[in-house]
Image (spheres, helix red, strand yellow):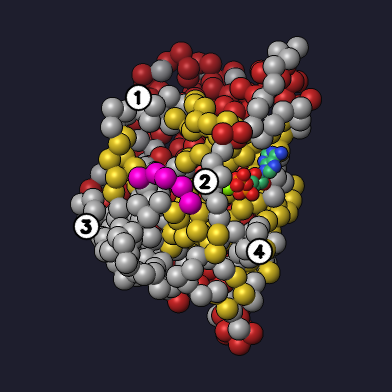
Amino acid sequence: MPSASIYHLKDVLIGLEVHCQLTNLKTKLFCGCSTDYRRDPPNTHVCPVCLGLPGSLPSVNRKAIEDAVVVSLGLDSQVSRKSYFFRKNYYYPDMSKNFQISQYDQAGGIPIALGGGIEIQVNHVIRKIRITRLQLEEDPAKLVHLGPIDLSPYTLVDYNRAGVALLEIVTEPDLKSPVEARVFLQKLRSILEHLGVSDGRFEGSMRCDANISLSGGKRVEVKNISSFKEVERALNFEMTRQRSLLSRGSTVGMETRHWDEARRLTISLRSKEAEHDYRYFPEPDLVPIVVSEEWLKELASTLPELPDSRRDRLVKTYHIPSYDATVLTGEKALADFFEECAVLYSDAKTISNWVIGDLLRWLHEDELGIEASKITSKTLVAMIALIDEGVISGKIAKRILPEIIRTGKSPREIVEEKDLLRMGSPQEIEGVVNHVFKENPGAVQDALVEEKVIHYLVGQVMKATRGRADPELTNQIVKEKLEKLEETR
Ligand code: ADP
Ligand code: MG
Ligand code: ZN
């Protein structure tokens, strides 16, 4: 039997631990260092606190707590009225203090929020993925290796990232496939974007550890996966690896593995039996986080519209299919763009078709977000208007779209520059038809007896005019010419 059947025999359980930087904060979680470090040289956004120098003391960024609460509310989680920072002790160069200030859900620890969930839709099935907990912690420094981690002769450390506010969102093992894991992450990113607390597009701003087990095996944790596409790949790899072990009668032990993006495989880092004992204990330098009823209410009142309700509103307001609205709200900037266009142009479904169809395809091709591309609502709508006015055909529009996206030029300018104006005069088209008839005498004879061949001739005219000829008019002229030939036969 093919391996696919083995896959269906085994239940797959996947749970994610997602680390989201609160990128909208100006400063780090426990010090005043700027979080805007991405374009700067290594180790330039540091101070005694985030370098963990002896005698330095942390103080909490109030806005970080607010953002964490806002995310908790957005995920329907129960915000803890009182939660605590804990020290997670370990010896590794990414944390110079030899501990990370984090939160804990055991030994008297209470994280910032518990419970909640996100609804995801895969193949028209909607499922709720439960969230276990949210915890606020500091980002460790970034370790840089030369090539693959297990072959690198050295490790470099960059403390710019150390101490940036990180929200860890842990799910229950409710995900059933690698695709669901990717869709979950995309939905989570869109929620964070709508909440305005984190831009998931910043490099390394959303990182994920993925846990996966197959029935009959133990849970394997795959660490440090950088993008959503890679999460799906890593999980697919792990699924196959574990399935093949189990089907050969071997066991899958509890372990932590590293996803090697370049080689597209997971490498064992350590077995869970050798897992560190982190010796968690309450952080003595920080007071508990207390979220008062008033503070909670105030923050709840600022909660913006989130992707699910926005999707429903788009369906109601613009009469577009729920599928379209789901794709559009999958990215805040995309939904914003759609609504901007809808102000300028009344046929929302036409806009939606362009946005979730060709536009999105080109953006993916260029690995660009809509906000980073040069297209604007004005230029997209101008392009659609050119089609309506008969200046260009839909085909030409599809052809100039990537140039609008990449250069930001107006569609009319591109059309004129490239001489793509629609050929609407019958005389002009007739000239081309005559030429095509002369070049394809065989096809012309065939077209007299077989209707289908007419499409071929029309296609040749379109080709000769680079899609500029009006297709209906061309069709009509070709048919008339054939009729005349028929009469004279
Ligand atoms: P740890 O500290 O060991 O990583 P956490 O509680 O932080 O434990 O995270 C556990 C993660 O593993 C959660 O995302 C959870 O959903 C997931 N998980 C737990 N059991 C399984 C399982 N049997 N298969 C896959 N994932 C699991
Ligand atoms: Mg964990
Ligand atoms: Zn600092």
Which residue appears at 29% of the width and 45% of the height?
157
Answer with mark 2 or mark 1, whichever residue precedes in sequence.
1
Farthest residue toward the right? 9
Q: Position of residue 208 (x, y in %)?
A: 52, 46
Q: Nearer the viewer, mark 3 or mark 4?
A: 4
Q: Is residue 91 magenta?
A: yes
Question: Dot 3 corresponds to which residue?
Answer: 44
Checking the image for residue 382, the label placed there is none
Q: Nearer the viewer, mark 4 or mark 1?
A: 4
Q: Is residue 126 magenta?
A: no
Answer with mark 3 or mark 4, whichever residue precedes in sequence.
3
- Type of amino acid at the residue the image marks with label 3: Thr
Answer with mark 1 or mark 3, whichever residue precedes in sequence.
3
Instruction: Measure the alpha-carbon separation of dots 1 and 3.
Output: 28 Å
Question: Dot 4 corresponds to which residue?
Answer: 108
Q: Nearer the viewer, mark 2 or mark 1?
A: 1
